Image: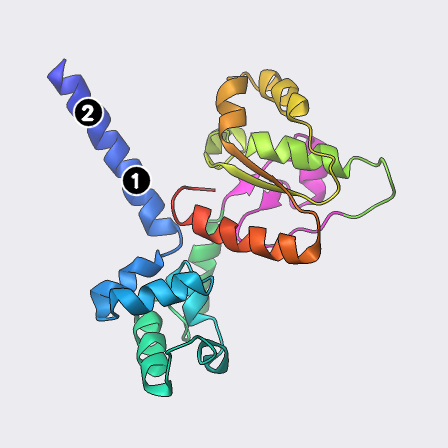
C-alpha cells in the first residue's frame, strides 16, 4: 500500500515538474533573483503575474508604476532577462522547440486537416470568423473539452479558460461533448474557468485575471 502511494506521489511530482518546466514563470521567482517582495507585489498590483510579462514590457511602461525609478526598473528587467530567453538561437534549436508544440483537435478530422493535420496549434493565436450560425461557438465549446484529452487523443491534458463576449456559452454542450469522448462531465466542467465579459474594459481585466490563473494551474 505504501509503495503504491509513493509511486502515485512520484508521478504527481513528475507531472508538476513538467508543468513548471513548460509553463510561465511566476513573478514571485524574481525574489530569488534579488528583487524585493515589496517590488514584486507592486508588479502584481500593476497586472504582471509572470516573469515573461515583465521581460516583454517596454521599459517606459514599467516606469509608470508608482515607486519604480529608472535604476530599479533596469534591475528588474535585467533579472527578468536572465530567466526568459530573449536573444538569438539557432534555427535547429527553434525547430526542436516547435516540434514539441502540442495541437488540440477541433473534433473534426477534415477541419484538423485544413489546419495542418493536427488541429489548433498551442502557443499561438487562432482566429475564427464567419457568418452567424456557422459553427464558431460550437468549435470553441469542443476545444474546451478536447484540450482536456491526453496527447495521444489530440488533447493537451490541460484546463480551459473561456471568456464569453456574446453570452453564447452553454455548459450543457460541454456535457454532451464530454460524453462523446468518454470523459466524466463533472470533471470536464470543473476544468473550465468561465467568465462573461460585458465590455472591452471588463474583458481586459478578465485577461489580467487569466494571466494570474495560468501561473497557478495548467491551461
Magenta-drawn stretch, dominant element (helix, strand or loop)? loop
Q: Is residue 203 left or right of residue 68?
A: right
Could you say where residue 84 lies in the image, as x and y percent from the top left? 36, 66
SS for callout 2: helix
Circle on res. 179: none
Residue topped by disc 2? 7
Give the residue drawn at x 47%, y 59%.
Answer: 95
Name the foreground residue: 8 vs 74: 74
Give the residue drawn at x 45%, y 34%.
Answer: 157
Could you say where residue 208 lies in the image, as x and y percent from the top left? 52, 55
Name the foreground residue: 137 vs 27: 27
In the image, residue 126 lies in the stretch drawn in magenta: yes
SS for callout 1: helix
Could you say where residue 101 lies in the image, as x and y percent from the top left? 48, 49
Q: Classify 10 Å Cα crowding around label 2: few (below 14), some (14-19), many (20 and above).
A: few
Residue topped by disc 1? 16
Residue farthest toward the top in the current orientation of the protein: 1
Residue farthest toward the left in the current orientation of the protein: 2
The magenta region covers 102-128
Amino acid at each position: 500500500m505504501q509503495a503504491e502511494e509513493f509511486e502515485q506521489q512520484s508521478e504527481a511530482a513528475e507531472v508538476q515538474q513538467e508543468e513548471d518546466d513548460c509553463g510561465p514563470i511566476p513573478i514571485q521567482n524574481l525574489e530569488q533573483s534579488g528583487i524585493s517582495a515589496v517590488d514584486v507585489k507592486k508588479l502584481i498590483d500593476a497586472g504582471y503575474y509572470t516573469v515573461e510579462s515583465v521581460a516583454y514590457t517596454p521599459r517606459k511602461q514599467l516606469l509608470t508604476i508608482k515607486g519604480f525609478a529608472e535604476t530599479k526598473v533596469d534591475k528588474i528587467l535585467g533579472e527578468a532577462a536572465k530567466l526568459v530567453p530573449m536573444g538569438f538561437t539557432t534555427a535547429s534549436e527553434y525547430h526542436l522547440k516547435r516540434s514539441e508544440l502540442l495541437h488540440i483537435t477541433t473534433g473534426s478530422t477534415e477541419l484538423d486537416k485544413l489546419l495542418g493535420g493536427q488541429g489548433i496549434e498551442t502557443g499561438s493565436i487562432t482566429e475564427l470568423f464567419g457568418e452567424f450560425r456557422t459553427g464558431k461557438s460550437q468549435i470553441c465549446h469542443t476545444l474546451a473539452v478536447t484540450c482536456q484529452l491526453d496527447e495521444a487523443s489530440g488533447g493537451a491534458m490541460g484546463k480551459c479558460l473561456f471568456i464569453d463576449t456574446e453570452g453564447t456559452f452553454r455548459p450543457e454542450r460541454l456535457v454532451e461533448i464530454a460524453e462523446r469522448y468518454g470523459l466524466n462531465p463533472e470533471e470536464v466542467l470543473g476544468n473550465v474557468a468561465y467568465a462573461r465579459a460585458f465590455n472591452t474594459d471588463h474583458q481586459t481585466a478578465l485577461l489580467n485575471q487569466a494571466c494570474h490563473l495560468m501561473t497557478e494551474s495548467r491551461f
